[in-house]
Amino acid sequence: MTNVVRFSKWLVCGTLAAMAGGALAQAKTVTFAHQDMLVPLRAVMESGELEKATGYKINWRMFGGGGDVIRAMASGDVQIGEAGSSPVAAAASQGQDIKLFWILDDIADAEALIARNGSGIESLKDLKGKRVATPFVSTSHYQLMVALKKAGVDARGVNVMNLRPPEVAAAWERGDIDATFIWDPVLSKVKANGKQIASSRSIGQAGNPTFDGIVVNSKWAAENSEFMVALVKALAKADDQYRKNAASWTADSPQVKAVAKWSKANPADVPAAMARYAFPSLQEQASPTWLGGGAAKALRDTSEFLKEQGRVQAVKPDYSVFVTDEYVKKAMAAN
C-alpha cells in the first residue's frame, strides 16, 4: 500500500470519525424553553446537575409566554418547553406533535385577577368598560374569560388587552390598565397596590382547573428516552425537596436565589409566591388526577372553550394521545 493510499484511508477514516462525533454532539444537545414561573426546576437549572447526569448540552431559553414556546416548538427550534394548559390545549387542537409528560405545577392560587386600587372594581361585574391585561391563550386568559362568563359578564364589553408579563408590569406602573389576570413575579408586584377579585383556585374549584406543564416533541422524546427519564427524576427530586423543606427556602437560600435568577423575580417575593402553587409528586403525576386521565380531560375542556372563543378551529375527539405517563412510570420503576 503506497503512502498516498494510506494517507487517503486515514483521511477518510478521520473524516468519518469527525462526522460521527459531530452527529453525536448534535444528538446530545437540547433546547429547553422556560418561562418566569417560580418553580423548583430553577434550582436544577442553576446546579447543572441534569447536564452532568446525562452528558447533554442544554440550551435554556426564556420565553415571555406559553404561546411563544409552542410556536418555537412548532418551528423545530425548541424540543422541550414549559407552557400552561391553555397553550398546550391549543397546540394539541392544531395537531402539533407534542406530548405533555410532566405537570410542572397545579396553579392553585398562583394566578389571580387583581384590580388597581382606585379603579372602582370590586367584582367581576365591575370589569365592564375597563382595561384588563393578560397574555392571550395563556391559562390566565382562559381563567379570565371563564370567570367573566360565569359571572354573566359579556367579554365584548371588557377591554381585554393582550400583553406579556413584562408588558403587564410596565403598563401597570404607567397606570395604563385597570386590572390584570397574571402570575408571579408580576402578580406580587401588582398586589402591592391592588385588590384580588378572583384566583385560579376559585375558578378551578368551580370546574375549570388549570396547570402549567412541560411538553416535548414526540419524535425527539422517543429518540432520547434516557434523557427524558433523567429529566423526570431531576424534576421529581427538586419538587420533593421543596415540599419537604419549604420553610428553608427563604429569600437568602441558594434555592430561592436560583429561582429568582432564572425567573427574573425579587428573591424576597419568591417564598410566598411559590407557596401558592402545588407540585404533584411522581405518584400524583401518574394518578388519574393528572397524567392518568385528568390532564387530558382538562385539555379537552379548555379546547372546547378556546373553540368558543375562536382561538382554535376544532376540538380533537381524544386528548389522551397528547399526554404520556411513560417517563414518569419509568422513573418510578428506577427508584
Image (tube, rainbow, N blue to C red):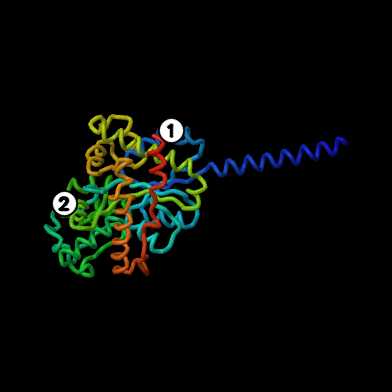
Please give left or right for residue 91 compared with residue 185 in the image. Answer: right
Q: Nearer the viewer, residue 194 or 85?
A: 85
Using residue 279 as the reference point, say whether residue 13 is left or right of it.
right
- Identify the image quadrant of residue 310: bottom left
Which residue sits at x=39%, y=46%? Answer: 34
Residue identifier under label 1 = 49
User: Looking at numbered disc 2 in the image, what kind of residue is underneath it?
Assistant: Gln
Report the residue that reaches farthest toward the right.
2
Above or below 152: residue 110 = above
Q: Which mark is residue 184?
A: none
Split into 4 quadrants, where in the image is the C terminus?
top left
Query: Mark 2: few, some, or many residues within 10 Å (few <14, many ≥20)?
Result: some
Above or below: residue 284 compared with residue 121: above
Question: In the rendering, which numbered label is found on residue 196?
Answer: 2
Q: Is residue 114 visible?
A: no
Quarter placement of the N terminus:
top right
Quick check: 55 above or below 309?
above
Label 2 sits on a secondary structure element that is: strand
Task: Choose between 65 and 264: the one closer to the eye.
Answer: 65
Q: Position of residue 238 (x, y in %)?
A: 34, 36
Q: Residue at x 24, y 54 (%)?
A: 209
Q: Quadrant of residue 263?
A: top left
Residue plotted at (75% across, 41% down): 12
Q: Residue furthest front?
A: 333
Q: In terms of depth relative to the viewer, which is nearer, 11 or 103?
A: 103
Q: Position of residue 17 (x, y in %)?
A: 68, 39
- Residue 325, given in percent of the width and then of the height, sits at 38, 48
Q: Nearer the viewer, residue 152 or 1?
A: 1
Q: Position of residue 193 (x, y in %)?
A: 17, 48
